[in-house]
Amino acid sequence: MSAPVSRRPDPVSRLGAGGLGGVRAGVELWLVLIGTIAGIVRMFRRGAARPKGAIVEQMWVIGNRSLLFVAVTLGFIGMVMIYQACLQFSRAIGDLSQVGTQFIRLIVSDFGPTLTAMMLATRVGAGIAAEIGSMKVTEQVDALRMSGVLPIDYLLVPRFLASVVMTVALAIVGAAIMYAAGGLTAYLSFGVNPRIFYDLQMVEGKHLILGLLKAVSYGAAIPVVSGFCGLRARGSSEGVGWATTAAVVGSSFAVIALDFALSVGALWLLGGDL
């Protein structure tokens, strides 16, 4: 008898398997989020198990070590954006008096927190996934479970709290540097009066609230998505590499999706008044 011929799955089967895998991953991600929130509640109620000083240590890793990266990146982005905006405005209408006021509104409500979070998604997201993924493939996560410790309480909760706090802080610092660098570029390249550029009268409370809400949402999403990817790592170093790549892609996508959802929601609530 001849050996049976192996057949590749047909496109419908592959599509169905991919869809089921996506649904399963979505459910697992949701469970990680719920577990993280429950871990925070347990921590404040009776003190969940976690390394001593873990939150402060993670604030240093996420915030202090990312400060230079965020500051330099957002500073250059601010200079490029203002240079291009002034160049186009000078060619079209020749009036540059409104560039600074519109720029600060965009920074506060969108660019500041969103660009900061995109930078953190690449650095912090990869770091969280690599750390947790390495513990997963070396069975340290299983050892925590055998010791009666919930891995999410021990690994994710400190990173979650530190990420929320430091994302907000870095978004404020990054926005200030971006605005300052843009004003300097406008002054040196196009002669825009700094008093006109650094005019904050167009910034209102709703812009600050929207920007703060975005920063908090991004700071919560990055460690959850990255931790989820790390906990799904399988095998050895190859699995850790996959988890790191997936964390960067997933965290970046989460930031973009949240930015779109919050911006649409704010536009729907406030209309053209935003």
Image: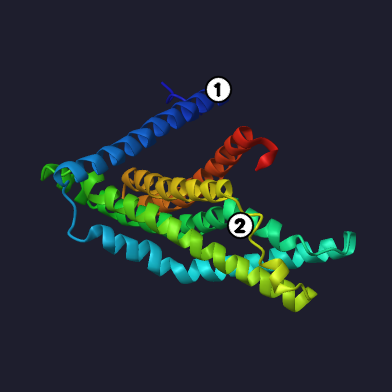
Q: What's the residue at 68%, 59% (across, down)?
A: 103
Nearer the observer, 222 or 16: 222
Q: Secondary structure at mark 2?
A: helix
**Mark 2–mark 1 distance (CA, rounded to whole Å):** 45 Å
For label 2, the crowd category at 10 Å Cα-Cα, with few meaning under 14, some 14 to 19 and many 20 or more, is many
First reached walking from the N terminus: tag 2 or tag 1:
1
Place residue 202 in its image quadrant: bottom right
Q: Quadrant of residue 193?
A: bottom right
Image coordinates of residue 122 in percent, x first then y, are: 48, 57
**Residue where numbered disc 1 is placed:** 12
In the depicted structure, whether residue 30 falls above or below residue 202 = above
Q: Which mark is residue 132?
A: none
Q: Is residue 151 above or below residue 20?
A: below
Where is residue 151? Give x, y as percent. Answer: 22, 45
Nearer mark to the viewer, of 2 and 1: 2
Q: Which residue is mark 2?
A: 107
- Circle 1 crowding by C-alpha within 10 Å: few under 14, some 14–19, many from 20: few
Q: Amino acid at mark 2?
A: Ile
Instruction: Report x, y in % for residue 31.
Output: 33, 33
As displayed, is residue 134 above or below residue 30? below
Residue drawn at point x = 38 percent, y = 30 percent: 27
Q: How is the image coloured?
A: rainbow
